[in-house]
Image (cartoon, rainbow, N blue to C red):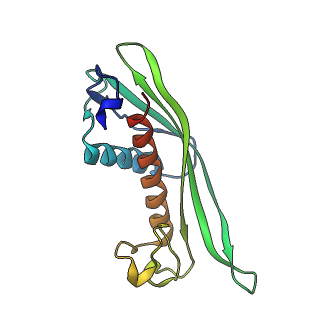
Amino acid sequence: MAGSIPPHIKSIAIPLMDNETAEFGLAEDITDGILDEFNEAGILRITDENVAHSILRGTVKKVNEGPYTYSKQESVSEYRYKIDVKVAWYDVSQDKNLLEGTYSGFGAYGLSGDIGSDGIDNDNDGKTDDEDDDEFGEPRAFATKVAVRKIAEDILNDIMTTW
């Protein structure tokens, strides 16, 4: 898959994203999520900005949180936590952006306090509760993790298919 990346780009720097939201720690979470995704894929060596062939910069632009599904009694049964991030992938040697775009990801959560028994497919993988071995933790934090993972996957996929 790395064949679609320009051949002169062998490394990438991923500095801490800027954060234009009031969500404390969100830029760190997203940056770490992207770093994890790149480390796992192993397509580019991650390095410091001063020696990198390319740089991925980003800004957390917006966070939306609101009702997602309602019960028969018309009360909110599920909330959706959505993150919007703007990124640019920059080619250092050719002094140009290779990719620019806005990426969004979301996670869902209920108010039960236990996502392992809330009846919600919190990570949108088609499984709920006992069927899903990775649904555990604080509901909103898990929704954030799901949104971050989706954004990181989409960015990596777009970088791999840029050329």
- In the visual, does 42 lie left or right of 121? left
Residue 73 placement, left or right of 93: right
| Image location (x, y in percent) of residue 93 | 34, 13
Which residue extends farthest top? 94
Q: What residue sits 34% from the left and 28% below the top?
A: 5
Q: Measuring 26% from the left and 34% from the top, which residue is drawn there?
A: 46
What is the quadrant of residue 65 in the picture?
bottom right
Question: The C terminus is located in which quarter?
Answer: top left
Q: Is residue 20 above or below residue 162?
A: below
Taking the spot 42% from the left edge, 23% from the top edge, the residue there is 90
Residue 27, position in %: x, y? 45, 45
Q: Is residue 74 left or right of residue 95?
A: right
Residue in the picture at 72% in, 81% down: 75
Q: Between residues 22 and 89, which one lies in front from this camera angle?
A: 89
Q: How many marks?
A: 0
Image coords of residue 78 (percent x, y): 61, 74
Viewport quadrant of the N terminus? top left
Residue 92 at x, y percent in the picture? 36, 17
